[in-house]
Image (cartoon, grey):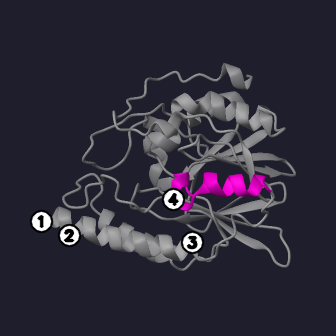
Amino acid sequence: MGALAIVATAPLLLGAADPPAWTRPQAPFPIAGPIIYVGSEGIAAYLIKTSAGAILIDGTLAENAGMIGRNIEKTGVRLHDVKLILVTHAHFDHAAGVAALKRATGARVVAGAGDVRALETGIPPGETNYGVIRFPKVHVDRGIRDGETVTLGTTTLTARATPGHTPGCTTWTMRIPARPRLLDVVFPCSVSVAGNRLVGNRAYPGIVADYRRSIAMLGTLHADIVLPSHPELTDVIGRGKRRQAGDTTAFVDPNLLPKIVAKAKTAFAADLAKQAR
């Protein structure tokens, strides 16, 4: 199936406040090594070229699937050469496009074990203050756990379980060649509360402990490059413009992840205290 034929086959319930940038087209651009940005202006999807095909991280919104397919082809990768789709977490803004992209590419879908049921039913896990926003269900070919790896060709990514935002929220890490040393790349799953019910969450009673462990674990990682699901978190689009202008180190910033972790810890404590009141 060609990229232009990708369509969403299930309705998506979008909130009125969803930012327009989430569906605004964005031309693909190189990041570093084999990594290319192929998402929309407001929600990230990353393509990783390997010696045996390509890996896609996240599918964003169902409406974006066609754009992502076209962006992939603009990089010179044929859709059927996308062999793996890795999912960060089972929320509509990151997983709704995965079903259409799986059909178009024939890729195997890999996601955190704790999110497999949500992805295969199209019903997000846990309880939130904004209700249930369903998304097209998708078969997960492999549920992955903390420390396990996926390899395509000579490229390997490691899954780090970072539950809280969802039970199967998964941070992906990899190393890319560079001089004078290899660079550590982290695709962090969100540790923002973002409407999650922290107190009295009957569907996810361990949510508070999971958030705390995940924030702490992220603090132990070293990241030269941080590529989040929401690009504004690390100014991915702005850095991409610098990269296209010739700044080959635009994305390299070892101080980014510690700053993100510190802010997340403070924000989580504030949200928990507010909900406890």
**Mark 2 secondary-structure assignment:** helix
- How far across and how far down the image is residue 59, in percent? 58, 40
Residue 35 seen: no
How many marks the image carries: the answer is 4
Quarter of the figure with the C terminus: bottom left
Say whether marks 1 and 2 touch (CB < 8 Å).
Answer: yes
In the foreground, 172 or 149: 172
Query: Tag on residue 277?
Result: 1
Q: Earlier in the sequence, mark 4 or mark 3?
A: 4
Q: Residues within 10 Å of mark 3 (few under 14, many from 20)?
A: some
Disc 3 to disc 2, C-alpha distance: 26 Å
Q: Position of residue 43 (x, y in %)?
A: 54, 45
**Label 4, label 3: how many angstroms apart (C-alpha)?**
10 Å
Residue located 55% across and 72% down the image = 257
Q: Secondary structure at mark 3?
A: helix
**Mark 2 to mark 4 CA distance (whole Å):** 24 Å
Residue 256: where, in percent of width, then height? 57, 72
**Cα gap from disc 3 to disc 1, whole angstroms:** 32 Å
Circle number at residue 256: 3
Looking at the image, is mark 3 or mark 1 earlier in the sequence? 3
In front of the other: label 1 or label 4?
4
Q: Is residue 132 magenta?
A: no
* Residue bounds of the magenta highlight: 228-245
Q: Nearer the viewer, mark 3 or mark 1?
A: 3
| Residue 9 against residue 107 in the figure, above or below | above
Q: Which residue is mark 4?
A: 233
The residue to which callout 2 is attached is 273
